Amino acid sequence: MFDAYLRRWNLAPDGASLETRVARLLPVRHLGRPAMLRLAAGEDERRGGALMAWWEGDGAARVLARDDGALLLERATGPGSLARMARAG
């Protein structure tokens, strides 16, 4: 399911895939940097991807690439808390 996007965006898997109620996710490396490939499981999530791209990283992960229900997102790493970062702006 991820293979087409791995080839299209020249990504290298960087961990185990995850499945949630709303998406399938795969940690990847993009241009040597950590990223997350996210495949939406429904129409609401597809529309949410368009909104994330429009936000351009302001208050959300930056979208590096988008194609229909697939998003390539920047991936946070390290000991920091995403919840704390979001609350701090």
Image (cartoon, rainbow, N blue to C red):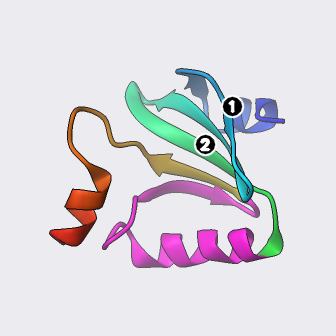
Where, quadrant-wise, is the N terminus in this rendering? top right
Q: Which residue is mark 1?
A: 6
Residue 53 in the image, given as x and y percentages of width and height: 51, 70
Q: Is residue 8 left or right of residue 79?
A: right
- Give the residue type at disc 1: Leu
- At 21% across and 34% down in the image, what residue appears? 79
CB within 8 Å, label 2 to label 1: yes
- At 60% across and 30% down in the image, what residue appears? 10
Q: Residue 59 colored magenta?
A: yes
Residue 57 in the image, given as x and y percentages of width and height: 35, 66
Secondary structure at badge 2 equals: strand
Span highlighted in magenta in the image: 44-69
Label of residue 37 in the image: 2
Which of the 4 image quarters holds residue 31?
top left
Q: Residue 66 colored magenta?
A: yes
- Give the residue type at disc 2: Leu
- At 76% across and 64% down in the image, what residue appears? 68
- At 76% across and 34% down in the image, what residue appears? 2
